[in-house]
Amino acid sequence: MKETKLKVNQIRKAFPNLPTLQNISLELSESQFVSVLGPSGCGKSTLFSIIAGLASPDAGEVLIDGQSVTGRPGRVSFMHQKDLLLPWKSILDNAALPLFLQGVSTGEARERAQQYFHLFGLAGFENYYPAQLSGGMRQRAALLRTFLFSKDILLLDEPFGGLDAMTRQSMQHWLMEVVQELKASVLLITHDVDESIWLSDRVYVLSRRPAVVKKVVEIPLKRPRQLNLFTDATYIALKETILDCFQRDV
Ligand SMILES: Nc1ncnc2c1ncn2[C@@H]1O[C@H](COP(=O)(O)OP(=O)(O)OP(=O)(O)O)[C@@H](O)[C@H]1O
C-alpha cells in the first residue's frame, strides 16, 4: 500500500459574490499520477493555488505527509501552461535556477541539473537560450526546473495547453515515461479527457462553478501504456463514464 502524500480535505473558496470551490476533497499517494478534470472557469487553478499554499481557502485543509500546510507555500512545485523560462539565461541555468536559489554553488547546480538533460530530451541544448528551442523543448525544460524545485509533489496546470496537437501527444507520451522513471507524485490540471485517462491512476471530475467533485474515476489500465490503448474496450468505457458526467452537468 502506497503512503498518502497529499490530502485535500473539504476545501471551500469564494471570491466576492463568486462561490468557486465547494467542499473539494482529493488524495494523491506516493508515485501516483492524479488528474483534476473540469470545465473552463470551474476553479481548477484556484484549487492548485490553494494546494501550493499561494492562496488560503475559506474552509478546509491541505495536508502533506499528514501535516497541515494550508496557506503555506514551499512543499510543492508548480508549472503553468506558459513555460516562464528566463529568456536571457541558458537552458541549463534556467533548469538549475531552483538549486541556485537554494544556495547550491553555480558549478554544482549546473552539474546536478545536467544529469537530467538526457531524460528530459534536452542533451546537447544546455547552452541554448529559450527562444532557440521548440515549444515542446521549452516545456520539458520548464518541467525539469519544476522537478528540481521540489521532488516531492509536482502540480502541473495545463502544461501542454499551448502546444499543437502532434507535439502535445508526444509530450503526453514522454511525460508518462519520465514520471514513471522519476517516481514522481503528480497532480495534473486538464480539460482534456484523453490526456487525463492516458496519464492518470485516478481522475477527479469537477462540475461547473461552484465546483464539486462529481465523480472519482480510478484508471485500472496497466503501465507502460501503449498508443493502441485508445481502442481498448476498458479505455472507451472509462471515457464514456467521464463524458457522461459532463453531459449531465448543464
Ligand atoms: N483572485 C480572484 N479574484 C476574483 N475572482 C477570481 C480570482 N481568481 C479566479 N477568479 C474567478 O474564479 C473562477 C475560477 O477561476 P480558475 O482560474 O480557478 O478556473 P479554471 O478552472 O482554472 O479555469 P480555466 O480552465 O479556464 O483555466 C473564475 O470565474 C475566475 O474569474
Image (tube, grey):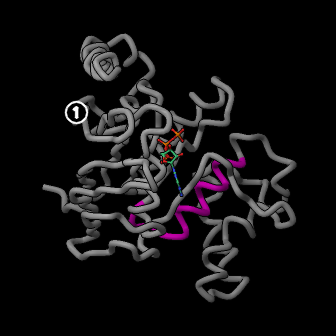
Q: Which residue is mark 1?
A: 215
Rendering quarter of residue 134: top right
Residue 116 pos. (x, y %): 59, 60
* Residue depicted at 24% across the width and 71% down the height: 65
Q: Of residues 37 and 101, which is closer to you in this image?
A: 37
Judge whether 140 appears above or below 164 on screen.
below
Quadrant where the N terminus sits is bottom left
Residue 35 pos. (x, y %): 37, 41
Mark 1 near ligand 1 (CB under 8 Å)? no
Quadrant where the C terminus sits is top left
Q: Is residue 152 inside the magenta stretch?
A: yes
Q: Secondary structure at mark 1?
A: strand
Judge whether 222 appears above or below 18 on screen.
above
Mark 1 residue crowding within 10 angstroms, few (<14) / some (14–19) / many (20+): some
Q: Is residue 105 inside the magenta stretch?
A: no
- Write the start and end of the magenta stretch as one range: 138-153
Rendering quarter of residue 43: top left
* Residue depicted at 43% across the width and 39% down the height: 42
Q: Of residues 168 and 19, which is closer to you in this image?
A: 19
Position of 75 with respect to 61 (left or right) is: right
* Predominant SS of the magenta segment: helix
* Residue 238 visible: no
